[in-house]
Image (spheres, helix red, strand yellow):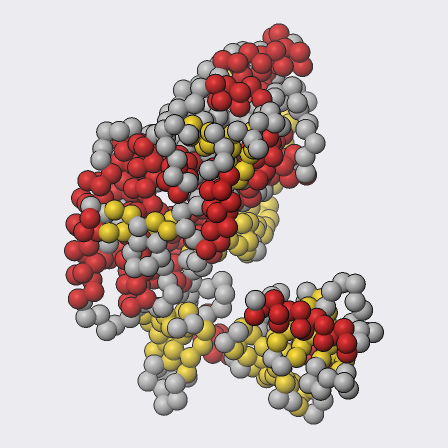
Amino acid sequence: MENNLVIVESPAKAKTIKKFLGDDFLVKSSYGHIRDLSKKNLGINVDENFEPEYEIPTDKKKIVTELKKIASQVKTVWLASDEDREGEAISWHLSEVLKLNDSNYKRIVFHEITETAIQNAIKNPREIDFNLVNAQQARRILDRIVGFTLSPLLWKKIKPSLSAGRVQSVAVKLIVEREREITAFKSKSEYKVFGFFDINGVIVRAELNKKFKTNKEAREFLENVKADDFFVGDVIKKPGKKSPSPPFTTSTLQQEAGRKLGMSVTQTMKFAQGLYENGHITYMRTDSVNLSGLAINTIKSAVINKFGEEYSKVRQYATKSKGAQEAHEAIRPTYVDNESPELGKQEQRLYDLIWKRTVASQMADAKIERTIIVINSKENSKYEFTATGEIVSFDGFLKLYMESSDDETSDEKQSVLPDVVKNTAAIVDRIEATEKYDLPPYRFTEASLVKKMEELGIGRPSTYAPTITTIQQREYVVKESRPAKSRDVGQLVYKNNQISEKPLSEKFGGEANKLFPTSMGVVVTDYLSGHFEEILDYNFTAQIEQQFDKIADGKLVWNDMIKKFYGGFNSKVEASLKEKENKKWEREVGVHPEKGLPIILKIGKYGPYASIEGAEKPTYASLRKNQNIESITLEEGLDLFKLPRSLGDYEDGEVVVSLGKYGPYVRNNSAFYSLKKEDDPYEITLERAIELIEEKKKIVKEAFSRTLEEIPGLKILKGRYGPYISFEKKNYRIPKASDPETITAEECKLIIEKKNSKGSK
């Protein structure tokens, strides 16, 4: 029997660590937390100084029993969970449940899973850091108080099964507020003027220093400059540089993987966790940009070997993030010389991103020369055209990596300009005055939402991905792509002494993987903002995070922090419960033109719907999936009442499309056929409906079904997960070795008896 038991959180991590330890070490996984707050009542004893009431979940009892048995037989238990607050709490829970004491356990931490790091950790064990444990407990307890207290309020005031959370509700508020900014935005247009000038045989594009509000003003300008001569009024050359970005933190990795690789924050963290657990990168939950001295020296050698001495520049970055407290190093490859380890496609893409960003951070600045050419008119000195461009004289870190940006507004590309001198003639090729609309604020992507949360101090590296996942799972927010619309824009072109007008069409408003608030997200945000303004206040949420940091530093007692929060919070909850609010959330969008009755939007048991108020017969219609209860127009509201909709006749029966409890469907001859995701009930044609009807009939016709005379009532069927036996309202899976088409009654009996005997046992 081994003398040492090492406990980590995941099997993958256990497998990697085992390679670096001798035969005297047994490595086991706890599969994450082994204890959590009890689900009975609040799980917190409020009267006993907010003492948490922990329990072992049913799915963890087997692993706890196994760990207890092994722990009792070994000399030393090494608690090797992650080095952040969550990992510290896991180690503490293990020590409590396994009844470990100072003499038979050691706590070890490491930032990377390499042989050197593991051996150093074994040589330098420490005790459990109860400040970190208490910071984790405080977060868990506070979030439980908020979630368990606010959620029932939402059930009572809005709709059953809703939920609220301290950080998730603030994240939804950000998205709701941004949507309102976009809805309130009134787009205006103006004419931007670009001149295209022939300077020494090269066409240079330059922008005028004035914009015009109307087509008339733009035309007047073109008329005024018809006979003008232009020349190069000035040439400005400025040497400059570009510096590399620091190595990745959790937040910047999520942002860059979203922009460059199209990964969601959840996918990014999943693949990063796999890279860490298999020893390829350092710990992936960190808000530090620091690199160890050893890592910097290793990267320096790699840069010189790969690119040459002139490309190397050693840098040590300082962490600017408020309350940076998790790990002590940025995310980097554990072995810089291993540029392409054997990985799956997605892991390789993420590893490549991390490798390039880390190595580029220790490379020389790129040297550039910015050039500005000013083009003046001899006749109208108040008008000035400007062309900007740049030349990269030394690529430096750009040879390897260039950070992307969230900026969606820039459509001006830097260009390389010709080498010219002042007073050179600039001959007009053409001048274009094009109508440009100003753009509304941009909706959040997952990556830009993480960036905003980090800027406001909301959450920490371990909470960004779970928060964004939760608000989508709870359907307060949806991630969608929406097609662009078209609009006409004006353009005036002066060429060859003639002014012509060109009608143009431009795309606008297209969205790709953006976060939209749902109707429920809007209603819940409004209710919480109205009754619990402090909970949804960005500064207050950031202050709570800072208090967790103080607990982690041993500068604040966690019970005192919870007590102070609970007093004011609980009184507001009680006040809200006492309110007699009979009126639910509703909004009138206008009056039905034929019935003369108001159309009211409401929230019901099955979600948002529209109602024609005052009609003799109640008339309701559910909102479409991508419609928001706050921004829907009267025209869109009227469209909702077009269902049920008759499409025509088929096989002597009317084909009707409608909405039901489980979604849109087609009805024909008393049979129902569900629409597919891509089918819109408001636009589906008779031809498409017939396709769905025939497809369903074919599936039913070809469905496998077999009976046996020896066992009346027994059926052999093929289902989604393979062949099975249906008998007396129970299902029995048929083993792969048996053929459902030839299986005998005796074999069926054995399968049923075996399953039933297991069940009774």
Q: Residue at x 53, y 54 (%)?
A: 480
Q: How many marks?
A: 0
Which residue is rendered at x = 53% and y = 82% of the image?
A: 644
* Residue 107 sits above or below residue 529 on the image: above
Residue 345, image x, y percentages? 68, 39
597 with respect to 557 (left or right): right
In the figure, 718 relative to 352: above or below?
A: below
Residue 549's x, y, as percent?
30, 33
Q: Position of residue 26 (x, y in %)?
A: 56, 33
Check the picture and name the quadrant holding the N terminus.
Answer: top right
Residue 427 found in image quarter: top right
**Along the line of sight, which residue is nearer the eye, 315 or 389?**
315
Q: Nearer the viewer, residue 384 or 313?
A: 313
Q: Where does residue 589 sit, x and y in percent of width and height?
A: 36, 70
Q: Is residue 591 visible?
A: no
Locate residue 701: give its quadrant: bottom right
Question: Which residue is depicted at the point 61% across and 20% down?
Answer: 336
Residue at 59% x, 38% y is 12
